Image: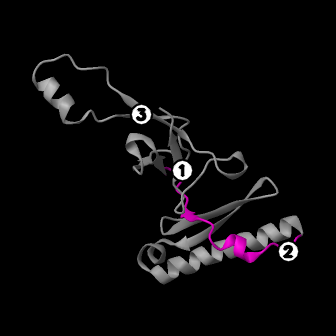
Amino acid sequence: MGPDTLKLRCQTFIDGELAHILLAVDRMLWETNEHAREHAQRTARQELHHYAAKRTGRDLPAADFDALPVWVEHPDRCEVECVGGPHDGRRMTWNSAEPPLVIDLPVDEGIAGLLAAVEGEPTSILRKATYVPLMGDGGFFSRTQDGAWRYRFQG
């Protein structure tokens, strides 16, 4: 695949196993044409539905696939979203296709911490917020609708 092609991923769990498909799409259409993007997402869900039905040998309801997330899979980076704690809702890009096992982020001490530092008071130990992967269905890591990995606040 060249630089003008993106890989879309759609996945779900069928009978406790991960089922996924990868769909190649034109980068320009994906990034500039909303109708083409919606069509590609719909196609990815339909392909996954077809694959899952064939794999299980059962007639699976198409409606179960209609709201599945579809995202661009990058080989060199991934998006991470924090859930809960001081960084709730914060998103960041990780420079790896796979997310880390734990994320430690500094906690903003606010204006009181800044004033204490200016007045020469000893600063406290840097507080941090720890985030760990949020588990979803089937014991696998949870993802947002656009494919970002979700991390929950642990402390």
Closer to viewer: mark 2 or mark 3:
3
Please report the bounds of the magenta region as a residue range: 58-78
- Label 3, residues with CA under 10 Å away: few <14, some 14-19, many ≥20: some
Closer to viewer: mark 1 or mark 3:
3
Residue 75 picture location, percent across and down: 54, 53
Label 2, on which residue?
A: 59
Q: Amino acid at mark 1?
A: Trp
Q: Nearer the viewer, residue 74 or 56?
A: 56
Left or right of 124? Residue 141 is: right
Main secondary structure type of the part rendered in magenta? loop
Label 3, on which residue?
A: 129
At 41% from the left and 77% from the top, the residue drawn is 32
- Label 2, residues with CA under 10 Å away: few <14, some 14-19, many ≥20: few
Mark 1 and mark 3 residues within 8 Å of each other at the beta carbon: no
Quadrant for residue 109, please give it. top left
Label 1, on which residue?
A: 149
At 64% from the left and 77% from the top, the residue drawn is 43
Earlier-in-chain disc, 1 versus 2: 2
Q: Spatial distance from mark 1 to mark 2, Cα to Cα?
A: 30 Å
Where 39 falls versus 6 (above or below)? below
Q: Spatial distance from mark 2 to mark 3, Cα to Cα?
A: 45 Å
